[in-house]
Amino acid sequence: MKRRIKLHLSVAAAIIMAAVVAGFFIWHSNRFADGDSSASAQPEPAEQTTNYYDNPSRAVLPGGDRIFLGENANRVQRRDAAGHVKWTTLLTGYLGSTRPPHLQADAQRVYITHNDGVTALDAGTGATLWHSPGPADRMLLSGDLLLAADCRGIQPGDVDPRLLLFRSAVTGQETRRVELPRDSFDALPIREVAGLFLVQRMDEVDMTGTNLLVDRNGLVQLKFDRFVISGVKRPAGRLFLTSHDVTLTSDEGKIAWSLPFSDPQWIADGGLLRLPDGDWMAFIFCQIANSGVEVIRFNPDTGRKMWETDCAPLPNVTHSKYEHTATVTMRGSRVTVNSQGSAGTFVEVLSAATGTQISRQVTYRWGGNDGKWSNSLKYIGPIAALAACIIALAWVRRRRRRTRVGFPVQPTGDSTAETGPRNA
């Protein structure tokens, strides 16, 4: 009986030791976090751009039905929410595969990049309604307008202008055209930003470019020489977030004020956040680098900067290929910055009033190229605990086996009991 109690106590001690070891390693792996992580809040999506390289091959209609574009099979198909096919239309020739989007839809029509232009199908039956030759890349449907850009490569001797084409969504007829820069203007997907159509290309490495904002009448209202991330329409003017700064423009297109970021970003993303007291926040980061996140709080009427904070990137990270996204949200008197990258994440909590850091928690990903041996500590701990449990169980099994087969057990005290094998 005493021997069994000792075995049980040994197993319990081994499990407790394993738990202590695991807890130590998990705690030690997070020692690079600054401050108390309990103050951090769950991030919420801010107003941000979308991935420019998504290639959607489906569109959702009012009511939940979906349109599928089979580029390789030259097939357009409508299915209900349960996946049942309502109609299938086969189209001969080229269906768009590069420079998306190539599929747009509304309750009446489906629009596809097809051959030398755009083809519209009846959304109810799949029958062809019209075909319109001309630019058909980066399509955008906005009300009764269908916009498309010319992304062709300019060849020697090619004198045709590069166009942004406005079509009537009902008839396919050209309604307006805007000339785009001819040289090296490979447009990104067209977006509606602050009540205007944004047509831009990715910045050059030196973070310069030509980007146009066009109204519904085909008139160029604004031009930027930097990448435009997002924008909002205000009672007087428009507020834009770019890869270099935050800028307020008047309704006439003149710059009222501009707040530069301390570290402009290439292939930038970010967002604008409206605060309850009327101030705004802007944040920016690089999508392909461990850039950290820069946050500015400002007065949108005067352009006065209230504070600016650089949330530092993950330390000791070296990389070539990298993916990075970030969100910023405000709850009460605290601002939470959540950064997620290939090497790991950080959640930094700032004071909404001053921008000073309240806490920062860093977590590295398994396999992330962070250059820290601590990256693997959180996994070594549980592995060590499991190994300790296995060793303890193996020791218990061995003790029991020795007892069953009759190996001698050392006597205690003055006992004169036989110590030889029981079945000898």
Image (tube, rainbow, N blue to C red):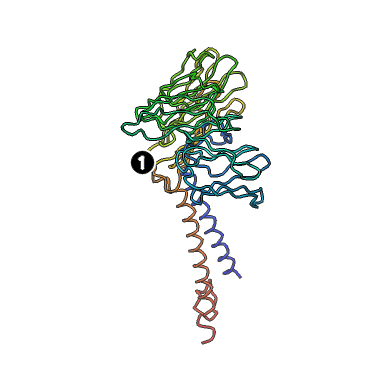
Residue 309 falls left or right of residue 332: left
Residue 279 percent across, percent down from the top left = 57, 19
The residue closer to the viewer here, 209 or 423, is 209
Answer whether residue 361 is visible to the viewer in this image. no
Residue 409 percent across, percent down from the top left = 51, 75
Q: Amino acid at mark 1?
A: Ser
Q: Is residue 301 above or below residue 401?
A: above
Q: In terms of secondary structure, where does tag 1 sit?
A: loop
Q: Quadrant of residue 59?
A: top right
Picture mark count: 1
Residue 279 falls left or right of residue 311: right
Residue 147 percent across, percent down from the top left = 52, 31
The residue closer to the viewer here, 204 or 417, is 204
Residue extending farthest to the left is: 156
Q: Identify the image quadrant of the N terminus.
A: bottom right
Residue 74 falls left or right of residue 184: right
The residue closer to the viewer here, 384 or 190, is 190
Q: Quadrant of residue 104?
A: top right
Residue 271 percent across, percent down from the top left = 52, 28
Residue carrying label 1:
320
> Label 1: how many residues lie within 10 Å, few (<14), some (14-19) or many (20+)?
few
The residue lying at 54 percent from left, 55 percent from top is: 16
Q: Is residue 168 above or below residue 56?
A: above
The residue closer to the viewer here, 53 or 138, is 138
